[in-house]
C-alpha cells in the first residue's frame, strides 16, 4: 500500500492467517499458486512474511478461502470457523478454475494441431 508500511508484527500476523485459512480449506501451496498463476515460492514467501500481500491478491484469496479481507488483514471479521464458513465452495472454485485452465490449453493445442494438419495437407497437394 503506497504510503503505509506494515510493522513486522502485522506482517507475521497476516502470514499466519493466510496459512491458517489455506490449511483450513485443505489446500496446498501448489494449489494456491496455480489458482493465482504465481510460483509456489511466492505463496511460501507470503506465508512466511518474506513478501507483502498485495490488495488484489488479498481480495482474491479472501474470496477463495471464504474469509473476509478484514480478517486476513486484522484478524477481525469472518475467518475460518465463523458461521457459514465452508471449505466446499473454495475447493469447487479451485477445481473449476483448474478445469477451465486445462480446457483452454487443450483448445489452444487443438487449434495448433489443426493448423499443422492444414499446412501439411497444403504442402502435399503442391507436390
Image (cartoon, helix red, strand yellow):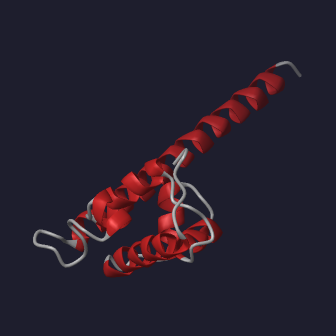
Q: Position of residue 45 (x, y in %)?
A: 61, 71
> Residue 17 versus residue 29: which sits nearer the camera?
17
Name the residue at the left extreme. 83
Residue at 10%, 72% (x, y): give it. 83
Q: Position of residue 87 (x, y in %)?
A: 25, 72
Residue at 52%, 74% (x, y): give it. 47
**Quadrant in the picture for the C terminus:** top right
Q: Position of residue 34 (x, y in %)?
A: 53, 61
88 lies above or below 119:
below
Residue at 50%, 70% (x, y): give it. 11
Q: Give the left or right position of residue 78, taking residue 20 as reference.
A: left
Q: Give the left or right position of residue 83, taking residue 30 as reference.
A: left
79 lies above or below 57:
below
Q: Quadrant of residue 43?
A: bottom right
Q: Give the left or right position of residue 44, taking residue 58 as reference.
A: right
Q: Quadrant of residue 46?
A: bottom right
2 lies above or below 11:
above
Name the residue at the top extreme. 126
Q: Quadrant of residue 30?
A: bottom right
Residue at 29%, 60% (x, y): give it. 70
Q: Position of residue 123 (x, y in %)?
A: 83, 25
Name the residue at the right extreme. 127
> Residue 97 versus residue 103: which sits nearer the camera?
97
Amino acid at each position: 500500500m503506497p504510503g503505509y508500511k506494515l510493522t513486522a508484527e502485522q506482517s507475521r500476523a497476516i502470514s499466519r492467517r493466510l496459512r491458517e485459512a489455506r490449511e483450513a480449506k485443505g489446500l496446498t501451496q501448489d494449489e494456491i499458486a496455480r489458482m493465482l498463476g504465481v510460483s509456489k515460492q511466492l505463496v511460501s514467501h507470503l506465508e512466511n512474511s518474506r513478501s507483502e500481500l498485495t490488495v488484489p491478491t488479498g481480495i482474491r484469496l479472501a474470496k477463495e478461502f471464504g474469509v473476509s479481507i478484514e480478517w486476513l488483514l486484522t484478524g477481525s471479521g469472518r475467518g475460518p470457523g465463523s458461521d457459514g464458513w465452508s471449505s466446499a465452495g473454495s475447493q469447487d472454485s479451485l477445481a473449476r478454475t483448474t478445469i477451465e485452465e486445462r480446457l483452454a490449453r487443450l483448445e489452444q493445442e487443438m487449434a495448433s494441431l489443426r493448423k499443422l494438419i492444414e499446412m501439411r495437407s497444403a504442402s502435399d497437394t503442391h507436390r
